[in-house]
Amino acid sequence: MVGQDMGLFRTSVPIVDADYAVESGRPPAEAIIEAIAAAADIDPMDLPPLYQFVELEAIDELFQNHGQKKETNALFCFQMDQWNVFISSDGKIRVCDATEHVEPEPIFENHSA
């Protein structure tokens, strides 16, 4: 599992777990936007412009191209307001509340999405 295999940890409380599938043709950025909106309990159109925090086209490029290389792991994370957002090359997204702290745990431990 990405994150756990690489020895990477989070110290914030998971709020939303989501998935994306590169093969579906749906850009990972769409799933990221929906996951952040779900965590914030707002409509995706009401989010602040994400380009202020991260370049979504670069994430799409990274994970759409990386999805063709199943033998390697990739993990990307960024913070947007109170949200820590983690995206893995195996199709997982986790949005955590950076204001709620926990002891360090693997990023995608207990992933239930």
Image (cartoon, rainbow, N blue to C red):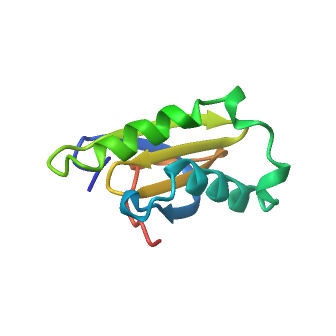
Residue depicted at 40% across the width and 66% down the height: 110
Is residue 55 placed above or below 75 in the rendered structure? above
Q: Give the quarter of the image for residue 91.
A: bottom left
Q: Is residue 79 left or right of residue 62?
A: right
Residue 72 locus on image (x, y percent): 19, 43
Residue 35 locus on image (x, y percent): 62, 58
Q: Is residue 26 left or right of residue 7?
A: right
Q: Residue furthest front?
A: 25
Q: Residue furthest bottom?
A: 112
Residue 34 seen anywhere in this rendered image of the structure: yes
Residue depicted at 24% across the width and 49% down the height: 68
Instruction: Give the tally of numbered discs.
Output: 0
Q: Give the quarter of the image for residue 92.
A: bottom left
Q: Give the quarter of the image for residue 14.
A: bottom right
Q: Of 98 and 113, which appears nearest the observer?
A: 113
Residue 9 locus on image (x, y percent): 39, 42
Q: Of 101 and 63, which appears nearest the observer?
A: 63
Q: Residue furthest right?
A: 46
Q: Residue furthest top?
A: 52
The N terminus sits in image quarter: bottom left
Residue depicted at 71% across the width and 41% down the height: 82
Q: Is residue 39 left or right of residue 108?
A: right
Residue 104 seen anywhere in this rendered image of the structure: no
Q: Of 108 and 76, which appears nearest the observer?
A: 76
Q: Is residue 17 left or right of residue 89?
A: right
Residue 22 locus on image (x, y percent): 39, 57
